[in-house]
Image (cartoon, helix red, strand yellow):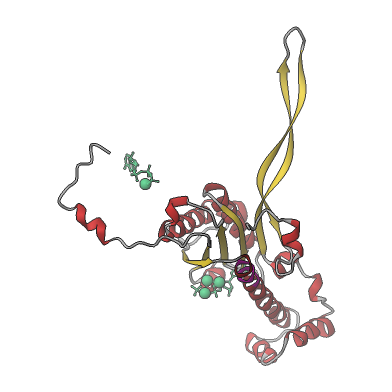
Amino acid sequence: TSNMAKSKFEYVRSFETDDTCLRNCYIVVRLDGRNFHKFAAQHNFTKPNDNRALGLMTRSARSVMEELEDIVISYGQSDEFSFVFKRTSTWFKRRASKLMTHVASQFSSSYVFYWKEFFGEQPLLYPPGFDGRVVLYPSNRNLRDYLSWRQADCHINNLYNTVFWTLVQKGGLTTVQAEDRLKGTLAADKNEILFSDFDINYNNESAQHRKGTALIWEKRDETVTKRMKVPNEEEKDVAVTRSRRRVEAHHCDIIGDQFWEDHPEILED
Ligand code: ATP
Ligand code: ATP
Ligand code: MG
Ligand code: MG
Ligand code: MG
Ligand code: MG
């Protein structure tokens, strides 16, 4: 602006490096909680899955999608969340550091802001932090494989954690014994331990825990009643329906084709 005359110090701006994200690529920002192993312990997260913490992560991700522009899908599990900007986005001139820091700070402040909605009177003991990284994916296949990778990670960890904590909580093993018991076991072995020893069918466990959370924009018809005054008539209540865009959560498989066929608007050509 006109009142910002150039000073002799102005040249330092030229030291800034260009971090424009390559055009046509999906821009993915992944956040991960800093030292959440300790954070979970200090805030008495239930093991293996604390639903309050998962709800708060999802609420914070929703805030990121609602407050920032051009995010078409986000996917979260444990203490991480990935946000996908549409490939044609020009938000902040596609500058990686701007996008990543806006996502990270909006997410972190929301995590603190909404804490009470999920943890009630249990106090937040210290300010949590999240790291962020930016990755570009040039094709729909690459992007889907990225999200598949995160969901496969969710599955592997959750299966392990479910058996581990069942052995401890229901089987009376110490954490060291449970770790020993699981050494070298394959997925089939873990399913078998749950089924034979504890009568648990892993597939009946919570979908949110097994699949993580995908957030997408969906159009929903919303009907509200409005009091209307039509000329020469009495005032009356009229039902007005309009289509509203809102963020919806899905706890389903996103590795196969079904989810993408059901929501063709997420991926661009
Ligand atoms: P880093 O700073 O390197 O990310 P970290 O301690 O956060 O270290 P992660 O690999 O990110 O390590 O693992 C996150 C940890 O947070 C999990 O191992 C788990 O103990 C805990 N955690 C996160 N979310 C939940 C939850 N909803 N319920 C229970 N535990 C959780
Ligand atoms: P952007 O998102 O592009 O940064 P902005 O509105 O934050 O937009 P800035 O150039 O960062 O624009 O300017 C910050 C503005 O915030 C100032 O112009 C001023 O109006 C306001 N502001 C910040 N701190 C204070 C303060 N301590 N007291 C009064 N106003 C403040
Ligand atoms: Mg980590
Ligand atoms: Mg972490
Ligand atoms: Mg993590
Ligand atoms: Mg500013």
Nearest the camera: 58 or 228?
228
Q: Is residue 76 placed above or below 200 in the rendered structure?
A: above
Residue situated furthest top in the rendering? 232
Q: Main secondary structure of the magenta part?
A: helix
User: What residue appears at the point 23 percent right and 37 percent down from the top-left corner?
Assistant: 3
Do we see residue 174 in this rendering?
A: yes
Residue, far left: 8
Q: Nearer the viewer, residue 8 or 248?
A: 8
**In which quadrant of the rendered image does the C terminus lie?**
bottom right
For the N terminus, the quadrant is top left
Q: Image quarter for residue 162?
A: bottom right
Q: Can residue 121 be seen in this view?
A: no
**Please, which residue is most extreme toward the front here?**
269
**49 w.r.t. 7: above or below:** below
Q: Where is residue 111 in the image (x, y as percent from the top left)?
A: 53, 56
Q: Which residue is drawn at 60% across and 51% down?
A: 117
* As drawn, 150 above or below 219: below
Left or right: 201 as drawn, with respect to 138: right
Which residue is at 77% across, 9% downward? 233
Image coordinates of residue 150 in percent, x first then y, are 62, 71
Residue segment shown in magenta:
143-148
